Amino acid sequence: MKKRVMIVGATQSGKSTLANVLNDATRPLKKTQDVIYGKNTIDTPGSYIENTSMYKYLIATAQTASHVLILVDQSRPTEVYPPGFAKIFTCPVVGVITKTDLAPQNANLVSKQLKRIGVLEPYFRISLKDNIDLAVLKNYLIGKQDSLEKIEILHIDNDLHLASGNKSV
């Protein structure tokens, strides 16, 4: 089963727009308090990151994700994540800096934010308005997903060999 990428970020940070791009979809953007499961993504409401009592839902939802994308809006570099936040997830966490076409003076600040919350480099700097570097992010995620699927298939094959008594695994 193909796993989806979970997208986490503050309200208006570009989560739903990025989900549309990663899903090759054009669903209308509207504010919602629901988790939206797309073809390739899990789009989480901004309120989940802005309210610490909702973290348990993020953790639970991430159990079915291949990766968690943590978004930081370069145009509004507010501190919404607590220190070490990225470490609560068991799947790989990817840092995505959105709206890079706006407020270039904040570029270093948002990189420091991602480091502080525990996201390891590389960070993907994207502009959804101009589609800057979206292909790089998509290719990175597709490559990682292909690797995960190969590992999953290998595990299934190994289990089948072991179940049939074939020890040539």
Image (tube, grey):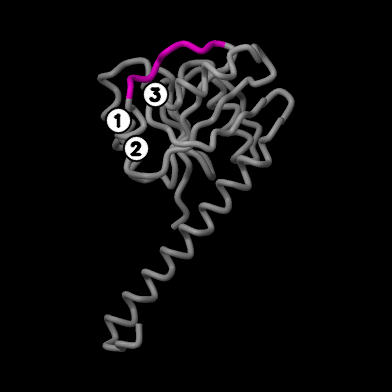
Q: Which residues are magenta?
A: 76-83
Q: How many labels, in total? A: 3
The label on residue 89 is none
User: Nearer the viewer's eye, disc 1 or disc 3?
Assistant: 3
Residue beneath label 1, please?
57
Residue contact between numbered discs 1 and 3, judged by CB atoms under 8 Å: no
User: Nearer the viewer's eye, disc 2 or disc 3?
Assistant: 3
Q: Give x and y (percent) for residue 32.
A: 46, 20
The answer to whether residue 7 is left or right of residue 28 is left
Callout 2 amino acid: Thr
Residue beneath label 3, please?
116
The label on residue 61 is 2
Quarter of the rendering occupied by the C terminus: bottom left
Callout 3 amino acid: Arg
The answer to whether residue 135 is left or right of residue 73 is right
**Dominant secondary structure (helix, strand or loop) of the stretch shown in magenta:** loop
Quarter of the rendering occupied by the N terminus: bottom left
**Dot 2 surroundings within 10 Å: few (below 14), some, or many (20 or more)?**
some
- State the residue at coordinates (31%, 88%): 166
Callout 1 amino acid: Tyr
**Dot 1 surroundings within 10 Å: few (below 14), some, or many (20 or more)?**
few
Q: Give the CA distance from mark 2 to mark 3.
A: 23 Å
